[in-house]
Image (cartoon, rainbow, N blue to C red):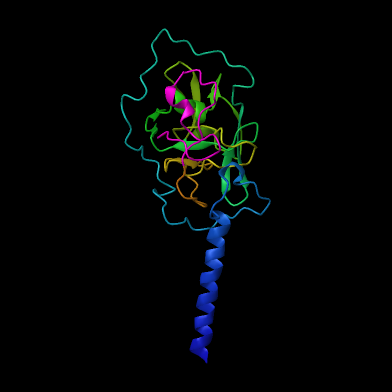
Amino acid sequence: MLPEKRKLMVVGAAIAAAFAVTGCAPAGYNAADYGDSAEPASENVAATPGATADPAATDAPEADPDATAPPAAANAAPELSEEEATTELIGTKVARMGKVVTNDEGFVLYRFDKDGNKPAKSNCVGVCAQTWPPALTSDGKPGVKGVDSKLVGTVTRADGSKQLTLKGWPLYTYIGDKKPGKWSGQNVSGTWFVIQPDGAKNLTCLPKVSKPVAPPADDSAGDSDADSGDAGGTGSDYSY
């Protein structure tokens, strides 16, 4: 009788685990609405299969050395409006994902595996930066809450603008996040991840790899591929 009871306990635990994974990344989820839950955040959920890196790892991934050319000396930093500048970095928690960093408007910030952090370097330019807007700064001194100010820095982009970094990693928002607190950019292209207040990737919840949303229709770069993507949230052909 006892072995049978143990068997039932094991089966019950397996079912509970399956529900936990489903609650993190339900099959057929709509990326545009993902992460919009009032459930308490979980801090200790194991990363689902498919995690590609140690969340504590900070070594710079291999990047194309020609992807971002140093700005010319004559390139002055563009003047930013209040709307364009990121004035705060806030360490907080959101449902299902747990620890995140948001900007002053409450939007979750991300890091990109193809960037570098030793030294800091942004390889997301052009059309990529239209889909993943960099967190720009005028003075490199945002207000911080729940984030160690010693981990905050800047990197100069090719156009002369300054982008905020966290432990060397350039910071971005995602145009697929339509409301504050959403994190539909998690694991996009297998290279974009929510960043934690310590600069590490947050792998608490790891949906299957998805494609980025298409850049805005009024693509100022005039990229001929801008019409080939799926603006609905997944399915664009961009590799960034």
Residue at position x 47%, y 26% in the image:
226
Query: Where is residue 116 drawn, in percent x and y?
Result: 38, 33
Q: Examine the image and state in which quarter residue 119 appears.
A: top left
> Which residue is at the front of the view, 206 or 136?
206
Q: How many marks?
A: 0
Q: Examine the image and state in which quarter residue 159 appears.
A: top left
Is residue 33 found left or right of 193 in the rendered image?
A: right
Residue furthest to the bottom in view is 1
Query: Where is residue 118 drawn, in percent x and y?
Result: 37, 33
Compared with 103, 53 (above or below) is below
Residue at position x 59%, y 22% in the image:
85
Residue furthest to the right in view is 38
Compared with 190, 128 (above or below) is above
Residue at position x 49%, y 25% in the image:
163
> Which residue is at the front of the view, 37 or 83?
37
In this picture, which residue range is highlighted in magenta? 211-239
Whether residue 233 can be seen here: yes
- Quarter of the image for the C terminus: give it: top left
Query: Where is residue 162 drawn, in percent x and y?
Result: 49, 21
Residue 179 lies in the magenta stretch: no
Residue 227 lies in the magenta stretch: yes
Residue furthest to the front in view is 228
Whether residue 125 can be seen here: no
Residue at position x 51%, y 52% in the image:
204
Q: Examine the image and state in which quarter residue 23 appears.
A: bottom right
Compared with 147, 156 (above or below) is above
Query: Where is residue 143 drawn, in percent x and y?
Result: 62, 29
Q: In terms of secondary structure, what is the magenta stretch mainly?
A: loop
